[in-house]
Amino acid sequence: GIVRWIGFEQATVFYTREARYSGKTHFPLFGKGPVAELIRGITSFSAAPLYVAFVMGMFVSMLSFLGIIYVLIGMLLDLNVPGWTGIMISTLFLGGMILMTNGFLGLYIARIYNQVKNRPLYIIKDKIGID
């Protein structure tokens, strides 16, 4: 990600790989290493996963309000076990709010992290007319 961010010119080098001479690969395609690199690559230069968490929290909060309405209707129609309504309302509401708050705090911390990295806004390739 850092090479693309800097803006250096890039070129693709095509080659034909010869077949393996002997043995088997020891590189685990779905092991710990590649998955860790995938997560590091996604999270190093983007706050997109944090936005996803925030939006999911908002979505779950909206769904929890629908669930609360459903639970209250069940209580009014005397379909619920006593005490179940209060537990469900608090669980649904707090679950959605916790997800949304975690996403919001994550975005806030990501902005702090980007500020602390102190990367320049621009990288100058050439200086023209400056002594």
Image (tube, rainbow, N blue to C red):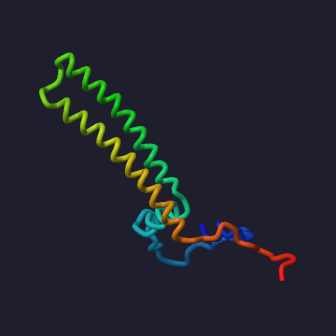
Image quadrant for the N terminus? bottom right
Residue at coordinates 55% horizontally, 74% vertically from top-left? 20
Q: Which residue lies furthest to the right in this view?
A: 129
Residue 107, placed above or below residue 23: above
Q: Where is residue 54 in the image (x, y as percent from the top left)?
A: 44, 47
Q: Which residue lies furthest to the left in this view?
A: 82
Q: Where is residue 30 in the image (x, y as percent from the top left)?
A: 43, 62
Count of marks overlaid on the render = 0
Q: In this view, does 123 lie to the left or right of 64?
A: right
Residue 30, placed above or below residue 49: below
Kindly tell me whether residue 14 is visible in this rendering.
Answer: no
Question: In front here: 70 or 16?
Answer: 70
Q: In this view, does 12 lie to the left or right of 22?
A: right
Image quadrant for the C terminus? bottom right
Q: Residue furthest bottom?
A: 131
Residue 60, placed above or below residue 129: above
Residue at coordinates 42% horizontally, 40% vertically from top-left? 58
Q: Position of residue 109 (x, y in %)?
A: 45, 60
Residue at coordinates 85% horizontally, 76% vertically from top-left? 128
Kindly tell me whether residue 25 is visible in this rendering.
Answer: yes
